Image: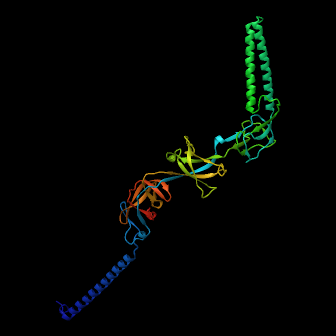
Amino acid sequence: MSESNHDPKRNRLALLCGAIVISAAGLWFGTHTSSLCMENAVAKMTDPVPGFTRQGDEIIIPPGSAYRSRLKVAPVALENIPRVLELPAVVEAEPERTVNILPPVSGKVVKLDVQLGQVVKKGQPLLVLDSGDLAQAYADDEKARASLKQAKFALDRAEGVYKVGGGPEKDVEGAQNDFLQAQAEFNRAESRLKEIGVCPGVRCKTRLLTMTSPITGIVTALTTASGDFANDVTATLMTISNLDEVWVTAMAPENDIAFVSRGQGVRVSFDAYPGRIFHGRVSFVSAVLDPATRRTSVRICFANPKGELKPNMFATVSIRVPQSCAVFAPDSALLMNNDSTTVLVETKPWVFVRRTVTPGYDEGNRTRIDHGLSPGDRIVVKGGVLLND
């Protein structure tokens, strides 16, 4: 054994150096560990609180989330709110009070006695037509009258000869046949003159035809002028409408037809008279649906003594429809999720689940909920879009 290994002084020195090294290592490790813990604590203190978290179908708003101040939750309740149908409408002249003036014969307009918008009385002259067809109709009537007179004379003579035995019976039968044909032709000529609008028995027969108004009303359309040729007897020369009563015609969509019936009270507003409300009742609901618009006509009759309601004016018809009690939700609570409408229902404080609902009609800024909500359910009524991901 060497001397160095048994030197007590040297051993004490080695032990002292080892202790110093171990102490230094422990001090470094402790300092480093404390620094890491401090950094982790600071990081945790500076991490932001998430807006919301999910656990299955639940949406949880944690304490300290900024969303708690941006969301508004309120309960829903049963309400009895009558539905108000607002239908677009237009003013129309009543068909039974409107007449289209057509020329009974072709000819030339030599005089026009009225203007567009003029009020006319029944029987008042409207225009004068110079017509060769009228002259032909008079000539046909004269020929038919003469033929009838000749046929009657021949029949009387044949009957007289037959009675004294001077002629055969077939002569009487032939004369009777000629008389019947002449009478039929005469009746046709007379009817033609009446159809034109002239008296068949007049002595002064002229080419000029004076057309008169069949009703009292207003000239609402005029398509001819003095000097114009009226060669098409199916073309309207003018339209006369009596506007003492008018129709307001609304168009009801197919899914609302069941709520409209004859005799139902309505409120009508007109763009031309803002602030004024006209009250009336449904006079007619069409039995036929327009295949293009899927709407049906709803007509309300209004007296119009002052002429305030003019054809083609725009209007809005409001019909109150009684409804049973139902749950209503603000429009801001409804969220679109793919093809369905949903709301966020609170199951526990600041815990929500998404629920699909069936919306009905709108009433102001609220919507009737037909299925999906019960009275007392608390839903997000503001800020739900923040959770609609």
When the figure is inspected, residue 387 is found, relative to residue 316, above or below; the finding is: below
Residue 29 screen position, x and y as percent: 30, 83
The residue located at (38%, 57%) in the rendering is 375
Q: Image check: 8 left or right of 206?
A: left
When the figure is inspected, residue 167 is found, relative to residue 114, above or below; the finding is: above
* The N terminus sits in image quarter: bottom left
Seen from the viewer's position, the closer of residues 370 and 191 is: 191
* The C terminus sits in image quarter: bottom left
Q: Image check: 231 left or right of 344?
A: right
Residue 259 screen position, x and y as percent: 50, 47
Structure colour scheme: rainbow
Seen from the viewer's position, the closer of residues 273 and 34 is: 273
- Residue 328: image quadrant is bottom left
Q: Image check: 179 left or right of 302?
A: right
Q: Is residue 194 visible?
A: yes
The residue located at (58%, 48%) in the rendering is 250
Q: Residue furthest left?
A: 1
Count of numbered circles in the view:
0
When the figure is inspected, residue 42 is found, relative to residue 168, above or below; the finding is: below
Seen from the viewer's position, the closer of residues 339 and 183 is: 183
The residue located at (80%, 34%) in the rendering is 131
Seen from the viewer's position, the closer of residues 9 and 279 is: 279
When the figure is inspected, residue 346 is found, relative to residue 238, above or below; the finding is: below
Residue 96 screen position, x and y as percent: 64, 40
Residue 300 screen position, x and y as percent: 58, 47
Q: Residue furthest bottom?
A: 9
Q: Is residue 389 visible?
A: no
